[in-house]
Image (spheres, rainbow, N blue to C red):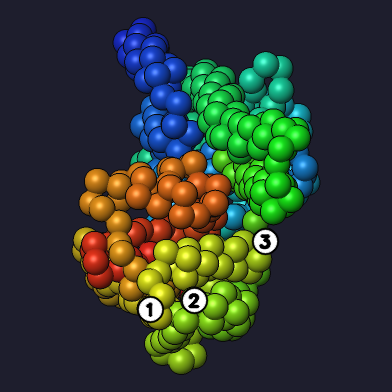
Amino acid sequence: MTISQPSRTSDVASALARAERLLEISRRLNSTLDIGLLLEQIVQAAAEMIDSEAASILLLDTKAGVLRFEAALDLGGFSLDSVEVPLEGSIAGWVVLHAEPVVIEDVNRDPRFFDQVDKASDFQTRSLVAVPMVAHDKVIGCLEALNKRGGQKFTADDVATLVTLAAQAAVAIENARLFQQSDLIADMVHELRTPLAAIKATTYILLRPDISEPKRTELVNTIAQEADRLARMTTDFLDLARLESGRSKMARKPVDLATLLVGALQTVQPQASERRVLMHLDISPPGLPEVMGDAEKLRQVVLNLLTNAIKYNREGGAVTVSAVLHTDHIHHEPGLAIGSSLSHMHHIHVSVEDTGPGIAPGNLPHIFERFYRVPDTEGYTTGTGLGLAIAKRIIEAHGGSIMVESEQGVGTRFTFTLPVPA
């Protein structure tokens, strides 16, 4: 491993500038508890301070025994969501297993180089520096900087800077994870109090000797309903906790969304028939391309949106489900694209629209928050308030997005987008 040395004349000024920049970044990282924003700040800082074309963070999934891209800056616009990097047979894996930094001047000459990302994207890795991310004596991932600008070699100062940044970032990530976990637990405990209080109050009434048999049966049914609600809440809570901590592994296989939607509609048809809600399906074009993802998780999202659309609909209303292929035209500056200044990115937009009472504008910004229920539906349903928060996490883990539009007295439409692989 050869590392070029900086010129002596710039040593002091460069070291002082880097130290000041690291101090500024450290303050910013320690004040951020949003993991997504935190990861974005880290890769931006890494690319800036090392003067590299790109940077990325791979975090360790201990259960699956792989590394996953959690953030990347400028890898040719390619989405790295759900990309797995093996511990054995990759440079990042070697760094994590050995807890040592590494500098590679020519990755094509290193047998550890995992070239699948380069093959799938428009980015070409030439050289890199990778350092372990260590928090509390535990390696949680790897921070990489790719391709020193101007064809220069990475220096010893580059490595030292990245090591310091990675150490600060690892602690900040662990703190953010702990905060999210404690925050989620606090919310969960608060939400559990309502059904527990109902069970306790009902049990107290049941102990009275003057209760009639019909009333006793009603109270027993109330306890059963609240117990079912507790069971659903704990199941959804565990699901959301796994998604937020990154422990929920997403499959990455071809998924036929048209088939998935037809199956989901068949599943909820009895519920729709009970409320006389008509179901419509529109797929355009009929032969939609496949997406890459986890079919079971995507089915979970669709079923959640469908059951909500039926439950909050009016008697005799309608639910319209559509899946439409969209093409985004991306213009490039001259010289950045080969052969053309225009490229295309395809997404599938899936919408679930109802004819219910709609949602008030003031409630829309909170609709994807965990444990949030629209105020005027309290008592109307026994939902956990976690379904839409879980749906949002699943869609974002697939590289997509989800949104809601609503007009009171007209209805509500939820739409999520999924990228179509090139």
Question: What is the secondary structure assignment of the residue under circle 3?
Answer: loop
The x and y percentages for residue 300 are 60, 63
Give the residue at mark 3: 251
Q: Residue at x 41, y 75 (%)?
A: 315
Q: Earlier in the sequence, mark 3 or mark 1?
A: 3
Question: What is the secondary structure assignment of the residue under circle 1?
Answer: loop
Give the residue at mark 1: 317
Q: How many marks?
A: 3
The crowd level at tag 1 (other Cα within 10 Å; few <14, some 14-19, many 20+) is: some
Q: Residue at x 69, y 31 (%)?
A: 204
Residue type at mark 2: give it. Answer: Arg
Taking 359 as reference, is 187 left or right? right
Taking 361 as reference, is 51 left or right? right
Taking 355 as reference, is 115 left or right? right
Q: Nearer the viewer, residue 70 or 361?
A: 361
Residue placed farthest to the bottom in the image? 286
The crowd level at tag 3 (other Cα within 10 Å; few <14, some 14-19, many 20+) is: some
Give the residue at mark 2: 275
- Using the numbered discs, state the Cα–Cα distance from disc 2 to disc 1 in whole angstroms: 8 Å
Which mark's residue is nearer the viewer, 3 or 1? 1
The crowd level at tag 2 (other Cα within 10 Å; few <14, some 14-19, many 20+) is: some
Q: Residue at x 77, y 42 (%)?
A: 63
The x and y percentages for residue 42 are 44, 31
Q: Earlier in the sequence, mark 2 or mark 3?
A: 3
Q: Is residue 338 visible?
A: no
